[in-house]
């Protein structure tokens, strides 16, 4: 695992296991929400500026989003909507991982199957996974799970015990395999000298290190993802 913010959340999940199954389940839900929001943020950042201002419109929606469903809707717009035409070439692999139709044996399929099992245990949207599916089904199913539990109800202790393991496996399959989480992430802050302070958010940030010694490149302060995974 390379993406440090998610590593920190995973540490919280591990600690919650010693508390109670309800605490464990709740921490997993926070982890899943974080994964969905990082995916959405990473994809929005990969939209190239163009005259139709797709990136601006999507950012406008996200900063005003009142639920996880809005984040999932924005991901879909980026992956299969008009905005998909303006994705940076380096993010096409992320798009393919999320939209490719895959069958049993692939990590995407297993992740979707596991989260659907959680929904079936709760009696929600209990449909069988088709012979082929894509990872878009994962985050849409997670949004349903989140809204039916944390959003509009509280699952019982027994229910949390039954579904927590499958939920964790499902989320970890996404975290450990999606290319976006293997890229180099860093927070850049430009000092008065014009050079940058690079705070790494992934295990490595060597691809950003040259910014520490140059003032010739102009970046706004913020979080950046290096296009190619290393």
Image (cartoon, grey):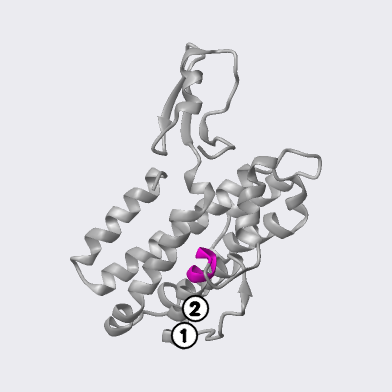
Residue visible at 35% across and 81% down?
155
x 54%, y 53%: residue: 39
User: Residue 44: x, y in percent?
Assistant: 63, 47
- For residue 167, say whether it is visible: yes
Residue 173: x and y in percent read: 44, 61
| 29 left or right, relative to 50 | left
Q: Position of residue 141 (x, y in %)?
A: 53, 73
Q: Is residue 107 magenta?
A: yes
Q: Is residue 215 above or below residue 69?
A: above
Decide: is 126 above or below 202: below
Identify which residue is drawn at 61% across, 80% down: 130
55 left or right of 171?
right
Residue extent of the magenta highlight: 106-111
Q: Secondary structure at mark 2?
A: helix
Residue 43 percent across, percent down from the top left: 61, 49
Q: Which residue matches tag 2? A: 116
The residue that label 1 is drawn on is 120
- In whole angstroms, how far apart are the C-alphas of marks 1 and 2? 6 Å
Q: Which secondary structure class fits the magenta region best?
A: helix
Camera-side residue of 100 and 54: 100
Q: Is residue 222 left or right of residue 15?
A: right
Queried whether the magenta region covers residue 127, the answer comes back as: no
Q: Residues within 10 Å of mark 2 (few under 14, many from 20)?
A: many
Mark 1 Cα shell of 10 Å, populated few (<14), some (14-19), many (≥20)? some
The residue that appears at 48% across and 11% down in the rendered structure is 193
Whether pointer 1 and pointer 2 mark residues with C-beta atoms closer than 8 Å, the reply is: yes
130 vs 190, nearest the viewer: 130
Q: Is residue 32 visible to the viewer in this orientation of the structure? A: no
Q: Is residue 25 left or right of residue 225?
A: left
Check the image and name the residue furthest to the left.
18
Above/below status of 186 relative to 34: above
């Amino acid at each position: 695992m390379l993406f440090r913010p998610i590593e920190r959340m995973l540490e919280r999940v591990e600690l919650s296991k010693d508390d109670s199954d309800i605490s464990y389940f709740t921490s997993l839900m926070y982890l899943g929400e974080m994964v969905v929001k990082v995916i959405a943020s990473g994809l929005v950042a990969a939209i190239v500026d163009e005259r139709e201002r797709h990136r601006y419109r999507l950012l406008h929606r996200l900063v005003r989003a009142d639920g996880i469903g809005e984040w999932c809707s924005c991901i879909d717009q980026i992956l299969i909507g008009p905005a998909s035409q303006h994705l940076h070439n380096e993010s096409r692999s992320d798009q393919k991982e999320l939209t490719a139709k895959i069958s049993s044996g692939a990590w995407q399929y297993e992740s979707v199957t596991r989260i659907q099992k959680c929904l079936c245990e709760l009696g929600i949207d209990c449909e069988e996974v088709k012979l082929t599916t894509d990872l878009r089904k994962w985050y849409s199913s997670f949004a349903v799970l989140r809204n039916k539990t944390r959003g509009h109800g509280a699952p019982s202790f027994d229910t949390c015990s039954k579904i927590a393991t499958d939920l964790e496996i499902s989320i970890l399959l996404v975290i450990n395999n999606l290319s976006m989480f293997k890229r180099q992430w860093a927070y850049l802050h430009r000092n008065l000298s014009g050079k940058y302070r690079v705070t790494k958010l992934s295990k490595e940030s060597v691809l950003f290190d040259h910014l520490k010694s140059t003032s010739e490149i102009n970046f706004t302060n913020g979080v950046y993802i290096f296009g190619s995974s290393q």
